[in-house]
Amino acid sequence: MKAAAAFLLVLGCLAVSHAWRCSGAPQLSKALQIDAGMGMVVATDAYKRAYFLSGRSWYRLGTTALKHVSVGPAGTWGTDAANRVHKLVAGNFKRATGLTMQQVDAGGGGQLVGSRPSTNLAYCLRKTSAVQYYGVGGIGWSTLSRALKYISCGPLYGCWGVDIKSNVFLTRTMSPTSCGTSGWIYVKGITMKMVEVGTDGSIFAVSTKGKVYQRVGIAARRPQGTAWRLVQTCMDVQHVSYDLRQLWVVTTSHILMTCTNVKSLAVIK
């Protein structure tokens, strides 16, 4: 009953938003984390089960217990409660021996990135290793020389991450073949607990206070953008992801929403 009441509250509140048109997404009980990429949407719940969305229904993704899952050009990867890394191979997740990661992201140009537990150091797995891994043997990670508790990459403007102090950093470029970067730039402003990079270069983040922000002013010559713009959600948010003009939101009440930028739709028309 509480979840249903909260869901109605979200819909009523979001209806007054001028920039974003939001609606309820297919609900997943106790949803914690969501990731969208390559036209797919995957998620995990509080019971450490991974799912994928087909139509209006969620279906179990493999049988391995995972706390975090990501989909993109590098494939579908996840991490379990012991921070071990897994890749989806032939319909089930296969463990990749090597360094442990508390979170991974497959949304770059074919490389896989992740954050190490305890040290929070960011690492990268080269494209050839990530794409071609088929469930046998270990994988070799390359350090990114930056401490980040959360990291996300896109194919256009590099990678963004959040450090243990919730400060935001970005690297303008990252080579999928070598994992080489252009160095890290501090993005001043709001402290964030996570940040996600969309395929089209869009950047969304969740603040330490549970508010959703979009980074505006991003361009090829200015990939860091100019400012953070609040996306009204009414309820505190835990996690977001963005792909193909759809913003996917998980609230702290485990409600799933999907939002579309109304202004962007007007420009397309």
Image (cartoon, rainbow, N blue to C red):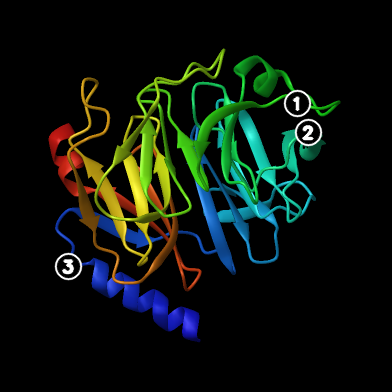
Q: Position of residue 230 (x, y in %)?
A: 22, 56
- 137 lies left or right of 240: right
What's the distance in space between the residues labelled 2 and 1, CA to CA?
A: 6 Å
Q: Secondary structure at mark 1?
A: loop
The reply to whether the C-beta atoms of the residues labelled 3 and 1 are less than 8 Å apart is: no
Whether label 2 touches label 1, CB < 8 Å? yes
Residue beneath label 1, please? 139
Q: Residue 48: x and y, percent?
A: 70, 60
The quadrant in which residue 125 appears is top right
At label 1, the amino acid type is Ile
Neighbourhood count class around disc 3 (C-alpha, 10 Å): few under 14, some 14–19, many 20 upward: few
Q: Residues within 10 Å of mark 1 (few under 14, many from 20)?
A: some
User: Which residue is identified by label 3?
Assistant: 16
Residue at 66 percent of width and 38 percent of height: 77
Q: Position of residue 19 (x, y in %)?
A: 17, 53
Q: In this view of the protein, can residue 78 be seen by the observer? A: yes
Secondary structure at badge 3 equals loop
From this view, report whether residue 125 is shown above or below residue 17: above
Q: Position of residue 128 (x, y in %)?
A: 65, 15
Q: Are marks 2 and 3 in contact (CB under 8 Å)?
A: no
Q: Residues within 10 Å of mark 2 (few under 14, many from 20)?
A: few
Q: Nearer the viewer, mark 2 or mark 3?
A: 2
Which residue is at the front of the view, 246 or 46?
46
- Is residue 91 or residue 48 the one in the foreground? 48
Q: Is residue 234 above or below residue 197?
A: below
